[in-house]
Structures are given as C-alpha cells and as structure tokens.
Image (cartoon, rainbow, N blue to C red):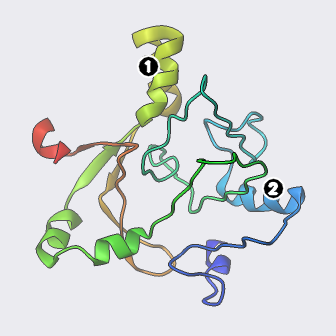
Amino acid sequence: MASAFYAPTTWLHALWTTPKLMISSSTSTTLGKLEGPHPVFSPDPSSPLAEVSHDSSNPPDGAEWHTDCSWSSSPPFASVLWPRLLPPSGGDTLWLSSARAFEDLPAGMKDDLRDLEAVHDMGSFRNAYASRGGAAGISEGHAEFGSAIWPIVRVHPVTGEECLFVNEGFTVHVCGMMADESRR
C-alpha cells in the first residue's frame, strides 16, 4: 500500500506537502490508518488520530530529531501531520531525508555504518513516566513501549535507497560498542 504514495509528481525528497489543501477529518483518518495509532499521543487507542498539545506546564518530550516510534518492532512507514491549531510562534516541525543524509556521508563512514545495529527505546518519553512514578514509572514505560534493535542503515522498501535509521530522540546505543564510543 505504501508504494501508492510514491508517485514522482507528488513527492519531493520523500516529503509530500499540501500547504493549502484542507483535508477532511475522514481523509486524515484514512491516512492515519496507514500509520496506525500513535502509542503516546492517541487519546483513543482505536483511532489513528493523535492529539499533541503542549504549553508551559506540559513541555514537549519529543522535541529532538527523531523518527516516530523507532523503538517499535514495526515502526510506521510514514508520519502524517495535520496541524489544526498552531501557536503564534514556535511549534516548528522540521523534516529531513534520511536517504540524503546517508548519501552525503564519506564512503568509508557509509561502509562502517552498514554493518552496525543500534538499540532504540522510548527516549525522552521516559520523563513523563519518571514524573508519575520514579524508577518504577520508567520500568512501566519500558514494559509498555519496549525496545528494538535496528540496522543503522536500512534499505527503503519502495525506492531501494539506503537510509540512516538513527535519531537523537530514541537511538540509545550502538550494539557492540562501549558506551562512550557509542555516544560519539
């Protein structure tokens, strides 16, 4: 199903934008079903729609560069963002091409990265769990979200491009390395 969205006329650097298109709630629900419910922001687990709302008393936990749900054993193939209410300033969402990021690396580094895997977990979402229950809360979060080990370089299932699959939000350790080496 994902291949239907890869028409060359609709994509620019694997990002499809429709800045002036007003889509209906049912259309956004259909798009969201391709991704499934967000495990953190979906108020209704049976709905693919997520509600993200932040203010000074509820700052964002996922404000670092990240790939949505990379800690999952089956991360979504895409992310859909449909902002309905934007703040007068801030609220920025930036997108990047992980294929282009890999492409721009030196050849030797590409070769080194192709053989590595990394652990992904709930990242900064642990803050909310810690505030609710300290170490026991963090354990609850890990039990709920789990962890996954992914190759650092993955091949896109539709385009065949090599893509980096690491992010500062949820990638916590490179397998086979000591902690200090893994953080570099």
Count the numbered circles shown.
2
Residue 134, position in %: x, y? 43, 10
Residue at point 30%, 72% (across, down): 102
User: Does label 2 or label 1 sit earlier along the sequence?
Assistant: 2
Residue at image position (22%, 73%) is: 105
Front in this rendered view, residue 167 or 71 = 167
Say which of 86 and 179 sits in front: 86
Q: Residues within 10 Å of mark 1 (few under 14, many from 20)?
A: many
In the rendered structure, are the residues bearing label 2 and label 1 in contact, judged by CB atoms less than 8 Å apart?
no
Seen in the image, is 174 located left or right of residue 161?
Answer: left
Q: Residues within 10 Å of mark 2 (few under 14, many from 20)?
A: some
Q: Amino acid at mark 2?
A: Thr
Along the line of sight, the residue nearer the viewer: 164 or 140 = 164
Instruction: Give the residue pinned by disc 1.
Output: 138
Is residue 115 something one can see in this rendering? yes
Circle 2: element type: helix
Q: Is residue 168 left or right of residue 83?
A: left
Q: CA distance from mark 2 to mark 1?
A: 31 Å
Q: Position of residue 68 (x, y in %)?
A: 52, 50
Q: Which mark is residue 97?
A: none
Q: Residue at x 89, y 61 (%)?
A: 24
- The residue beneath circle 2 is 29
Residue shown at 42% from the left, 80% from the top: 160
* Residue at disc 1, secondary structure: helix
Query: What residue type is disc 1 on?
Result: Ile
Q: x%, y% of residue 131?
A: 50, 14
Q: Which quarter of the image is occupied by the N terminus?
A: bottom right
87 is higher (above) or lower (below) than 128:
below
Q: Position of residue 11 (x, y in %)?
A: 60, 81
Is residue 88 shown left or right of residue 90? right
